[in-house]
Image: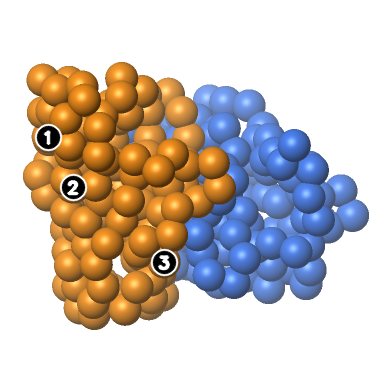
Chain colours: A orange, B blue
């Protein structure tokens, strides 16, 4: 099973600033990676798939990059509604696995 | 509007059986797989497995194989997750989510909270 490791566990950033979240796979997953946002009491929401393609309706301030084992989610200018937990997910190998999450909190 | 609507919260005792549901609307139910994802209290997401509503073909994660059964009824656009004998460790939020062949979960149900306690 592929292990996905996200860092940092918690990230404190001020509104308007840039946030960079990392995700590392224990082996190469090509570009078969997705990012999800989860707010308290809500289901996750797909942000990015194929490592860099924004899902329908996702604002342009969200961008994804990387391939192989190293991936990054960047939020260019944080809005109040962006403070949440973010998960990466690999779907290159069965079973697909999620990272443990990065909590993005207001500084 | 594309929607997945799940059945309501459940409180059960250890050893009891349970089936929860996920109903799709606003899209062709048989054109997408349905996956189930577990989230234990305060924890992350775990992919349990998936089912193709066209023929009810299932594919379980090894961690959940033999512990749950997934099924579907395409005539009413519904998918199900069931347990024959619940344990306290099954206490969690369970989400259904749809996806095409590549499992990017672009629509999620609201979740069903299952609490197992004596």
**Who's the residue at 50% across and 51% down the image?**
A55
Q: Is residue B83 visible?
A: no
* Label whose residue precedes the other's in the sequence (1 or 2): 1
The picture quadrant where one finds residue B35 is bottom right
Give the chain of mark 2: A
* Label whose residue precedes the other's in the sequence (3 or 2): 2
Quote the CA–CA distance across marks 3 and 2. 16 Å
Residue A79 coordinates in the image, percent (x, y): 30, 24
In-image side of A30 versus B116 (left or right): left
Residue A62 coordinates in the image, percent (x, y): 34, 44
Q: Is residue B20 visible?
A: yes
Residue marked by disc 2:
A21
- Mark 3 nearby-residue class (10 Å; few <14, some 14–19, many ≥20): many
Q: Are marks 1 and 2 in contact (CB under 8 Å)?
A: yes
Residue B113 coordinates in the image, percent (x, y): 50, 30
* Label whose residue precedes the other's in the sequence (3 or 1): 1
Residue marked by disc 3:
A50
Are marks 3 and 2 in one subunit?
A: yes
Looking at the figure, which quarter contains the N terminus of chain A?
Answer: bottom left
Label disc, if present, on residue A74 of the rendered structure: none
Residue A26 coordinates in the image, percent (x, y): 17, 72
Q: How many marks?
A: 3
- Mark 1 nearby-residue class (10 Å; few <14, some 14–19, many ≥20): some
Residue in front for this viewpoint, B80 or A93: A93
Q: Are marks 3 and 2 in contact (CB under 8 Å)?
A: no
């Amino acid at each position: 099973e592929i292990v996905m490791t996200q860092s940092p566990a918690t990230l404190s950033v001020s509104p308007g600033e840039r946030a960079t979240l990392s995700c590392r796979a224990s082996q190469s997953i090509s570009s078969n990676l997705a990012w999800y946002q989860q707010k308290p009491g809500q289901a996750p929401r797909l942000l990015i798939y194929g490592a860099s393609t924004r899902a329908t309706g996702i604002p342009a301030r969200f961008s994804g990059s990387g391939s192989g084992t190293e991936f990054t989610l960047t939020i260019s200018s944080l809005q109040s509604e962006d403070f949440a937990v973010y998960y990466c997910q690999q779907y290159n190998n069965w079973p697909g696995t999620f990272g443990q999450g990065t909590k993005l909190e207001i500084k | 509007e594309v929607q997945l609507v799940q059945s309501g919260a459940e409180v059960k005792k250890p050893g009891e059986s349970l089936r929860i549901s996920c109903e799709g609307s606003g899209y062709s139910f048989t054109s997408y797989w349905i996956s189930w994802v577990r989230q234990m209290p305060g924890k992350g997401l775990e992919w349990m497995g998936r089912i193709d509503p066209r023929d009810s073909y299932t594919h379980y994660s090894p961690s959940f194989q033999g512990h749950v059964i997934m099924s579907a009824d395409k005539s009413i656009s519904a998918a199900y997750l069931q347990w024959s004998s619940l344990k306290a460790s099954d206490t969690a939020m369970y989400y259904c989510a749809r996806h095409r062949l590549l499992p990017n979960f672009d629509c999620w149900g609201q979740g069903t909270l299952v609490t197992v306690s004596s």
